[in-house]
Amino acid sequence: MVLFAIMTVLCGVLFLASLLTRIEPGAFGDMVAAQEAVQKLCSDCRGKSFEEIRAVCEEYENAVIDYCIFLRRGAAEGGKYSSLSEANEDISNYFPRFVSLSDDSYAIGRFGWTALDAVYEVRDLALHLSDYADYLDSIQEQAARTAGVGIFQKKGGFSSKNIQKTAEDFAKLDGSGVSFANNASLEHWLAYEFADYFFLAMIVIIVLAFLDERRNGLWHAVRSCRKGRASLGLTRLGILAAGSVLAVFLVYLLPLLLSCAFSGGPGDLGRPIQSLESFRRCSAAVSVGGWLAGYFFLKALSGIVIGLLLWCVLGSLANPQFSLGVLGATLAGEYGLYRLVPVQSAASVLKYLNIFSYIRISELYSNYFNINLFGAPVSVREIILASMPVLLAAFAFWAVLMQAKRRPEGNRDVLSRIAAVCNRFFDFFRSRFTVGGWELYKTLVYESGILMAAAVVIFSGALNFRGLNSPGNEVYMFSTYMRDLEGVIDGGEEDYFRRARESADGYQAEDALLAIDLVEAKVAELKERAEAGGYEPWVVYGGTYNLFYGSAADSVQRLNAAAAILFTVLLTAAVFAYERQSGVTYMLRSMKRGRYVLFRRKALAAVLAAAVAWASVYLRELYDFLNYCHPQTLGAPVQNIDELSRFPLKMSIVQYLAVLYGMRFVMLCFVSFAVLLISRLSRNVLGAYLAGTAVLALPALFLALGFDEMKYVSFVLPVSSAEVLWKMGDGSLWHALPWAAGAAAGTAAVLAARRTWCGGLGPTAFA
Amino acid sequence: MELKLENITKNYGSFTALDHLSLTFETGICGILGANGAGKSTMMNLITDNIKRDGGAITFEGREILEMGDEFRAVLGYMPQQQGIYERMTALSFVTYMGRLKGLKGRVLQEQAEQVLRLTNLWDVRHKAVGQFSGGMKQRALLAQALLGDPKVLILDEPTAGLDPRERMRIRDFIKELSKERIVLLATHIVSDIETIADKVILMKKGKVVSMDTPANLIASLPEDWRPVAHVPSLEDVYLCYLGD
């Protein structure tokens, strides 16, 4: 139940995150405000024709664009408004949140995108509804047309039959039946694919619990009980059914309710399901309400079928040690078939009679597929729906029969023999490992470090490394000239400015000339500043650095630091907890090298874990930065960047970056030491993961989401280091305090962990 | 060789596990008998420095073991009572890993690993994961690691629990053989094991030594009213006499 609760919360949090344009402070407020505005938009559209709805959407879109242009350029540039109060009054009729943001250009830019995205969704819906009838007609026309074309005339050919069947299936739909409503809540909910994986994970948890007695050596005892066979099988069948219904409620119904809470409900439940853009290709004549009811029912049913299948597969293993491996292989195999088998291939049955087809029930309705079954086109939806009760009955029978008849004759199965052969091979190497080698091996293999590292690398691919940047035209031109001119100031700039002024023409000439003037003034300023500061003058466009490491990227940096901390927790948490879970603490501590040497090796494993987290997040960032910046500027003294003009240490930009990335690694090592202590104090690996996440990762995530007070209790600022260094641009070394605090906390943690492992306190409470 | 416990005290809150215990162990097997909670495992955990003592001193060859640190642990072989083990390691991996932690390496490690696995009859299943072992096999794997590194002090907490009679006798004979050059502390509930191989027996109750002597002397000193009528007196009768309530 604890795992169910954790997954429900995680599922809900990820669902909310999926509604945001960007994950940063203020983005949630943007989303709520945009959805409120869209509700008003939809109520404005009520009773209007689809064409009129599109016009209303354009009105909202123009309101956003005009307002943003006015704020950027002012009334003098020919904008729609003559004063800010006029602009505010107008925009408050559409998106009132803009008015409260009027002194924060970054927040306005961000909300502008969120608002436009929301309006575009309604506009696209109107577009879909207005031409839906034409779409249905086109299906019928295509059928009639292709019937007369040569290649389709082959009597009894699959293509011909498929087109005719498609036309027949869609013929029963009424193109004029679709109606307008605010679909945002349903569309956002349907787009949230993670729910399917949480659902699958919950079913897997239930099934693995059925095998607990085997793992704990109680299989014989359970089978010896009066109700330990068929009766237990039937009871577990009931538990699986109830668990599946509960899982549907937690990971599908709750996010739907959340979505409705933000987007104003599902709208008229009696309208045809085709009124949703996602169901344009749906051939089923069903209402939204009817579809939702059927969807939840089918989801619960599919959960039971999947659970039964996994139960049958895992339950047939004589040796429960292989459960997780076989489970992984089964899911990987099924996913491979689901993704790789072509739709119209002979093996497509394997694609559709598949765990992943069963958990993606909505795709059966949002997509229209027929497969070639002995020359006849058969609807995938019909196959899956028809197969479900058959599989349910067959698997249920198999599972209960297995529970009743399967004897615990462990260790004689094929997998055990294969494992023995593999172990013989691996033992050759393992028996030559050093203590350090063993620690690494245990971390990677026994503590699932490889899987964690793979997950970390995959998830870090979703990170963004740049701040939000939407400069106006003149700023854009200024940055273009600055970047063009980047390099040592050597007197050749005058010639560049002359040529640039000569080539400035066309409708942007005015902006260009203004930008050149600004660049010329900037170059003079840089020269003067460098002479006063005693360093070499360079033209360096600071905006590039600001975008990645400066104040414009504060939110991004905090979020990435939080991600790096979370990754470090996941990779390090098991290091000590695994020993305690295995019950070997006393034995290890009684060995000559079981205390200080082992501790040092474990600390090294923690440092390696920090290195993986660091590389996953920050090497990606560095790669992105090096692709964006002009590498020739890296040798410039860092003081040439405006915001770092008073940086207290004389160094080049490349040295500045070396300090930045080096400090990040060092601080992540301190985080991993803190995790080491948590791991040392935890009774088991799961407890270490939970405690590490609660103590280190959650405060970091809360800070990244805007709870500023959390900066005092999280490692985000020292790990990010970007804020620390950027603020030192004002000449003060006091901004380095977060580093000192992080180092102190990490050092105290590693010393405490060392003390509890190597002696001193003694491990009475930690054995 | 001499391992000496002087005035050792250990409390768990208000419960006194060891009450000013003083003992001297010399080469040979010293069997420790006592009911659950008598303080046997606490004493062993104090000798292995796995729990902190509240008072007293433990010396090996005249030196405080806490000061010796790794030097003492280098001559120590310890088999804990609980069957805590790395379930996913094979027997060979487990033994070689433990050997590494005892400072063994190279050919010596490989040879000793083979030797202890053969001795505990685990050589044929050395490539099998320990998690698949029966209770008795896990017990033997734990014994195997304790024997690595030629320990001078061997502390065995319930070494023959869960073994079949043949294995038990084999292990028992082997421990007897080992004890010629070592201090072996053997805690067990199987009184016949101690009666057969122990040079000296300590009877413990509520953290104190009730009696200590050779098995023969203990049996001989059995009070008249505790002497059985139907069979020849054994150490079990001594156990019941001193420790039975």
Image (tube, rainbow, N blue to C red):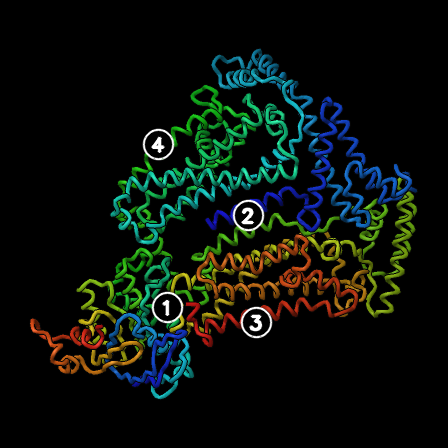
Residues at discs 4 and 2 in contact (Cβ within 8 Å): no
The type of residue carrying mark 1 is Met
> Does residue A280 sit above or below A107 in this rendering?
above
Observer-nearest of A276 and A349? A276
Looking at the image, is mark 3 or mark 4 earlier in the sequence? 4
Rendering coords of residue A529 (x, y %): 86, 65
- Of labels 4 and 2, earlier in sequence is 2
Badge 1 marks a residue whose secondary structure is helix
Amino acid under label 3? Answer: Ala
Q: Is residue B182 left or right of residue A757?
A: left
- Residue A9's label in the rendered image is 2
- Tell which subunit mark 4 falls on: A
**What is the CA distance from the residue labelled 1 to the residue labelled 3?**
30 Å
Residue A377 is left or right of residue A111, and the answer is left
Pointer 4: what residue? A394
| Sequence-earlier tag: 3 or 2 | 2
Crowding near the residue tagged with mark 2, few <14, some 14–19, many ≥20 C-alpha atoms within 10 Å: some
Above or below residue A611? Residue B202 is: below
SS category of the residue bearing label 3: helix
Q: CA distance from mark 4 to mark 2?
A: 34 Å
| Amino acid type, callout 2 | Val
**Residue located beneath label 3 in the image:** A748
For mark 2, name the chain: A
Disc 1 packing (10 Å; few <14; some 14–19; many ≥20): many
Q: Nearer the viewer, mark 3 or mark 2?
A: 2
Share a chain, discs 3 and 2?
Answer: yes
| Residue on which disc 1 sits | B98
Disc 4 versus disc 2: nearer the observer = 2
Question: How far is the residue under mark 2 from the one under mark 1?
Answer: 42 Å
> Where A477 sits versus A428, above or below?
above
